[in-house]
Amino acid sequence: MNKNTVCISIILLISLVLLYLTPLHAQDEKKLSFIVGTHASSNVTDVYFNFLQIAFAELGYSLTLTKVPMKRAYQAVDTGEADGMVMVPEGLEKIYKNMVLIPEPLTTIHTVAITNGRQIEIKGMDSIKHYTVGIIRGYTIAEKLTQGINRQIVNDHDSLLTILELGRIDIAIAMKRETLRFLKEFPKYENITLLEPPLYSIGLFPCLNKKHAPLVDQITPVIKRLIHEKVLEELYKPYDVQPEKKI
């Protein structure tokens, strides 16, 4: 075998090795597609997604994020079109059977009654069932709480508070933190009052499609540790509001 033949043989061998190694390397890349509902506050959603990126990176995963309407997001995780969702309310996995919750809540949401300066004693949903209420489309919790109640459904906080000010509804029902954040950004709604105590409180958990169920036991202690180390708290600080502040 002459020198040229040896060189050609070596080049072919290297080429074959690269040909087989390249797809193997691609298969070794670990990626997860996450999804979130478009009704959620964009900046705050990004905070929780960034936190999950940090957590999953410790296991060697990179995450991507897609935003779609809320119910579409639930369906995407349930069908496996998306690998996970940034946050879902506890109990949703009983409706969407292919969802698996990561059992470490990222936050707790408080659903409150909101009036245009009117004071109403709040003792659960029975306190408001005789009023005309307004809710934001796509908020599953508010939709369930107001079933059977005379209600109007709108697309966003601006529309909700507008019909409240105009007297078209007696009470608006929305998430406390998001409403406070909206009012801080748009202070034109001067008489809006958030009533206490909350009508309903529930934890929000990250979730995965069941095909990734083995990851739950691996990622849960990572998320728990990072929360304990105040990583999430530091990420959230620029967007925090003072819940006790009277509006």
Image (cartoon, rainbow, N blue to C red):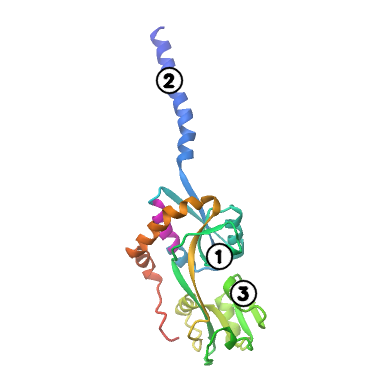
Instruction: Give the secondary structure at mark 1.
Output: loop
Separation (CA) of disc 2 from disc 1 = 52 Å
Please state which amino acid type lies under the numbered disc 1: Thr
Residue 15 in view in this figure: yes
**Position of residue 176 in the picture relative to residue 74 (left or right):** left
Which percent across, then down, holds residue 174? 54, 78
Q: Is residue 239 above or below residue 7?
A: below
**Label at residue 38:** 1
Quarter holding the C terminus is bottom left
What crowding class fits label 1: few (fewer than 14 Cα within 10 Å), some (14-19), or many (20 or more)? some
Please state which amino acid type lies under the numbered disc 3: Lys
Q: Tell us which disc is closer to us: 2 or 3.
A: 3
User: Reading the chain from its start, which is encountered first: label 2 or label 3?
Assistant: 2
Please state which amino acid type lies under the numbered disc 2: Ile
User: Reading the chain from its start, which is encountered first: label 2 or label 1?
Assistant: 2
Residue span colored magenta? 48-57
The residue that mark 3 highlights is: 144
Separation (CA) of disc 1 from disc 3 = 19 Å
Which percent across, then down, holds residue 1? 41, 7
Please tell me in which quadrant of the rendered image residue 143 appears.
Answer: bottom right
Separation (CA) of disc 2 from disc 3 = 67 Å
Residue 49 belongs to magenta span:
yes
Residue drawn 40% across the image and 59% down it: 223
Q: Is residue 213 above or below residue 170?
A: above
User: Reading the chain from its start, which is encountered first: label 1 or label 3?
Assistant: 1
The residue that mark 2 highlights is: 11
